[in-house]
Amino acid sequence: MNKQRKPYKKPPQGMSLIELMVALVIIAIISSVAYPSYQSHMAGARRADAQAVLMEAAQYMERFYTENNRYDQDTSGTAVALPAQLTESPRDTGIKSYDIAVQASTASTYTLRATPKNNQTGDGFLELTNSFTKSWDADNSGSIGAGESTWSKY
């Protein structure tokens, strides 16, 4: 009556290779959807930062006009130039994404431009005029076309 007992078997621990591969495929699919969305969001955030610097540069230009009664030069005839902290975006440390400059100026008008560089290349330039007309070369054609007279994406 001596029944022989079967030895106790531990349940398998860990994952099989197939389970691991399925997990990796799921992660790859999620990443392929999430990463482009993340990149698009970051490009929009860098563009928004450049827009903020353009607005600050416009405020500087208005103060310059108040002091000199013109946008293009001061009372001694020196051409207008933006202060160093307003010539790149972002203003804080990190990779600079835009160069900010006075694109054109006359005694009564100015145009400020943010030109993309580094990780923002190909996004198209942003412009702001003395009448606060905002433009974005969204198709990166090198000029402001129909439907690009706004900073909005859509």
Image (cartoon, helix red, strand yellow):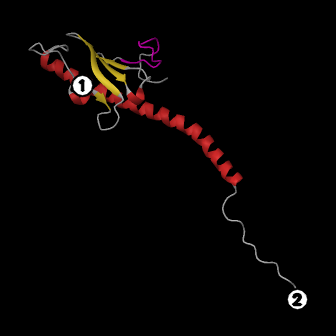
Q: Can the viewer see residue 110 in this picture?
A: no
Where 51 sits versus 75, above or below? below
Q: Can the viewer see residue 67 in this picture?
A: yes
Where 73 sits versus 29, above or below? above
Residue 151: percent from left, percent from top: 41, 22
Residue drawn at (47%, 34%), measured in percent from left and top? 41
Determine the CA span between mark 2 and mark 1.
97 Å
Residue drawn at (21%, 21%), measured in percent from left and top? 62
Q: Which residues are magenta?
A: 134-147
Which mark lies nearer to you, 2 or 1? Answer: 2
Q: Earlier in the sequence, mark 2 or mark 1?
A: 2
Residue drawn at (65%, 44%), measured in percent from left and top? 25
Residue 95: percent from left, percent from top: 35, 34
* Quarter residue 26 falls in: top right
Disc 1 marks which residue?
59
Q: Residue furthest right?
A: 1
Disc 2 marks which residue?
2
Where 46 sits versus 143, above or below? below
Report the amino acid beneath label 2: Asn
Residue drawn at (28%, 20%), measured in percent from left and top? 101
Where 34 sits versus 146, above or below? below
Asked whether, in this view, residue 43 is left or right of residue 131, the answer is right
Residue 88: percent from left, percent from top: 29, 28
Q: Secondary structure at mark 2?
A: loop
Residue 92: percent from left, percent from top: 29, 37
